[in-house]
Amino acid sequence: MWSVLKINKKEIEFLKQDFKKKLGNDIIFYNPKIIIQKYKKNKLFSKEYSLLGDYIFCYQEKFKSNKFLDLIKFSRGLKYFLKSTNADQNELQNFINKCKKSEDKNGNLTNQFFDYSINSNYKFKSGPMTDKLFRIIEIHKNKLKILLGGYKTTINKKDYLFYSV
């Protein structure tokens, strides 16, 4: 059963060890991450961010029993344990599958994860046009035709990370 945990990021390894000790080695942790690239003084810097902030997904069959929830709720590194029901499992599994489908070979999310719409404003978060605003004019399979300032250009979806403004 999938559950959502609010964690202390600095103590994540203690939490994983504690859960494995109490629940066994058949536990799965999943934390979708994204890499943001920025230029500062003509140098490209990359930083990895968790998509969910302080939250991670955790899978263990024993989470169905309240007995095991009481056993782990005071684990080091755990701030809060969000109890989920069987009705939540489909939504959690669909979200995790969508994340895993859009990961690159290093396990970081790509732009395939995000949905785009025509005539919406976006802002670049990576590449040479970091922090520049643009508008999507056309959407093709792997390319976007955009309006950047007064110029129309085409970019590859996979090469840049951007978000809706």
Image: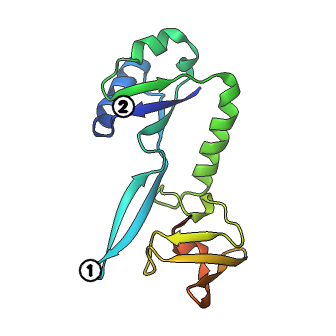
Residue 79 position, x and y percent, is 37, 27
Question: Please, which colouring scheme is shown?
Answer: rainbow
Other residues around mark 2 within 10 Å, as few (<14) / some (14–19) / many (≥20): some
Question: Disc 2 marks which residue?
Answer: 16
Quadrant of the rendered image containing residue 74: top left
Q: Is residue 5 left or right of residue 8?
A: right
Q: Is residue 143 visible?
A: no
Q: Residue furthest top?
A: 67
Query: What number of labels is visible?
Result: 2
- Asked if one can make out residue 86 in the rendered structure from this viewpoint, the answer is yes
Q: Nearer the viewer, residue 12 or 8?
A: 8
Image quadrant assignment for residue 78: top left
Q: State the separation of the CA atoms marked 2 and 1.
A: 39 Å
* Relative side of 54 to 64, left or right: left
Viewed as shown, does residue 58 lie left or right of 113?
left
Q: Is residue 74 left or right of residue 151?
A: left
Which of disc 1 and disc 2 is earlier in sequence? 2
Circle 1 residue: 41
Amino acid at circle 2: Lys
Reply above or below: 64 against 109.
above
Amino acid type assigned to the residue bearing label 1 in the image: Lys
Residue 66 spot, x, y in % from top left? 53, 11
Q: Nearer the viewer, residue 35 or 118?
A: 118
In the image, what residue occupies the spot 62% across and 83% down?
147
Q: Quadrant of residue 156?
A: bottom right
Residue name at image x 61 percent, y 59 percent:
114
**Whether label 2 touches label 1, CB < 8 Å:** no
Which mark is on residue 112?
none
Q: Is residue 68 above or below residue 97?
A: above
* Secondary structure state at the residue bearing disc 1: loop
